[in-house]
Image: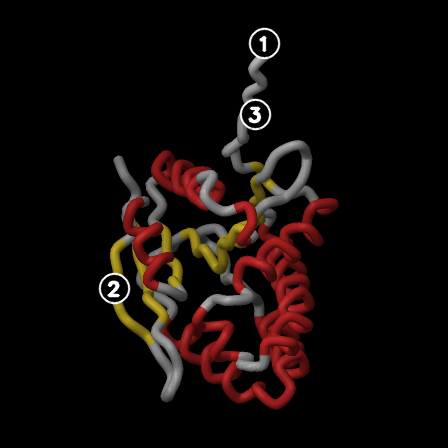
Amino acid sequence: MTTTTTTVSTTARKAPAEDHAAVATALAAAFHSDPVFRWLTPDVDRRRRILPAFFDLAVDVFRRHDDIWCVGRDGDVAGGAIWSPAGVEPMDEADGDRFAARCAELAGPDASRWEDVITLLDENHPHHTDHDYLWLLGVAPDRQGHGYGSAMLRAVLGRGDRDGVPAYLEATSPDNVRLYERHGFQVTAELAVAGGPSLWAMWREPVR
């Protein structure tokens, strides 16, 4: 009798341009039931419609940094991570204006909620030292449990450790907080807009 073993690759890779659409699709699936995105767009059907376009926009805005990562097996994409590297602004003024306007357009009747959260994150983003910024990381629900999220974290955090660069992110759920804590992040603040769910600002010093 022959036994076949399937090996799941948990090595993250820089996402080439041809994988960017798949990264956006995986992120849209990953965040569909996320507490923050459920509050931003409470209607399930509208949220399912707009999130793919939102993550397409995010990938487009951040692609100039060449720091979008993905992971999967057999050439597919199970999840993605969108970073901006230390020493650059995540968005320049033109991209920021385009991003905010497009988010408002996508959000429709929920635009004020999206605007409030975007403003909250902007106002609380640390500027005291250069850092790698993890804007969003997610794995499609049917692909979770294989270490994909950790693989995408290790890829950039390992670079930061080598270069002595800290990292920052905003976690959108207690489960995500626990994941990031396992990789050395610490909560520095709990953030929320009036009536909205918590987000957790998290900082990680490089491991020497």
Task: Tell me the residue at 32%/44% (across/down).
Answer: 183
Q: Position of residue 25 (x, y in %)?
A: 66, 56
> What's the distance in space between the residues labelled 3 and 1, CA to CA?
16 Å
Q: Are marks 2 and 1 in contact (CB under 8 Å)?
A: no
Task: Tell me the residue at 66%/32% (across/down).
Answer: 74
> What's the distance in space between the residues labelled 2 and 1, CA to CA?
55 Å
Q: Which of marks 1 and 3 precedes in the sequence?
A: 1
Q: Position of residue 79 (x, y in %)?
A: 56, 48
Amino acid type shown at disc 1: Met
Q: Nearer the viewer, mark 3 or mark 1?
A: 1
Q: Residues within 10 Å of mark 3 (few under 14, many from 20)?
A: few
- In the displayed structure image, the side of residue 122 where residue 179 appears, left or right: left
Mark linked to residue 1 = 1
Q: Is residue 59 visible?
A: yes
Q: Position of residue 19 (x, y in %)?
A: 69, 46
Q: Which of marks 3 and 2 precedes in the sequence?
A: 3
Residue of label 3: 6
Amino acid type shown at disc 2: Thr
From what the image shows, is residue 4 above or below residue 63? Answer: above
From what the image shows, is residue 108 above or below residue 173? Answer: below
Amino acid type shown at disc 3: Thr
Task: Tell me the residue at 67%/62% (across/down).
Answer: 56
Q: Residues within 10 Å of mark 2 (few under 14, many from 20)?
A: few
Residue of label 2: 188
Quarter in which the N terminus is drawn: top right
Q: Is residue 94 visible?
A: no
